[in-house]
Amino acid sequence: MMKLKSNQTRTYDGDGYKKRAACLCFRSESEEEVLLVSSSRHPDRWIVPGGGMEPEEEPSVAAVREVCEEAGVKGTLGRLVGIFENQERKHRTYVYVLIVTEVLEDWEDSVNIGNLGNRARSCLKKKKKKAR
């Protein structure tokens, strides 16, 4: 099923869930630093980059496209972490690992999210465990 929105086509699975794809973007294969982007709806919140799948688009292709649009990074797509459901919002999201190989200076959402301002990105580093 598809629904048209002013600037995009939303696709839904057989259960009526919006089809989405996202990536956990890591700076290296050690997976110690993850990239987050500011939410377009709530700029004070940090989120994993991702979004809706286009008609006939494979989840892995959508994940790579969304990461480039929202976070301005390119990389090597890795494993599927899982398919996550948000029953409240009726979303079903395919989440992959992506190892970042290129960081773009300018990217689509850094200049193009309407009157909401520019999207920011930041890396969080995994906390090291204390030795006992």
Image (cartoon, helix red, strand yellow):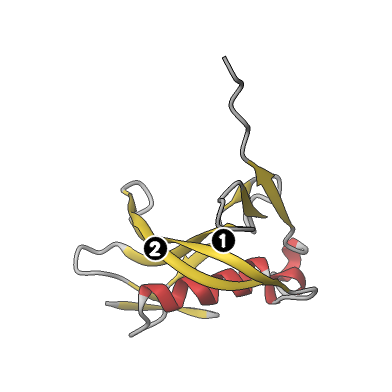
Quadrant (top left/top right/bottom left/bottom right) for the C terminus = top right
The alpha-carbon separation of the residues under discs 1 and 2 comes to 16 Å
User: What percent of the width, then of the height, locates residue 34?
Assistant: 61, 51
SS for dot 1: loop
Which of 48 and 99 lies nearest the eye of the viewer?
Answer: 99
Residue that label 1 marks: 49
SS for dot 2: strand
- In the image, farthest residue toward the bottom: 56
In this rendering, the answer to whether 46 lies above or below 61 is above
User: What percent of the width, then of the height, locates residue 64?
Assistant: 51, 74
Residue at 69% across, 50% down: 123
What's the amino acid at mark 2? Arg
User: What percent of the width, then of the height, locates residue 130?
Assistant: 61, 21
Q: Residues within 10 Å of mark 1 (few under 14, many from 20)?
A: many
What's the amino acid at mark 1? Pro
Q: Which mark is residue 79?
A: 2
- Give the tally of numbered discs: 2
Residue at 27% across, 77% down: 1
Q: Is residue 61 visible to the viewer in this orientation of the structure?
A: yes
Based on the displayed image, in which of its 4 quarters is residue 121 positioned?
Answer: bottom right
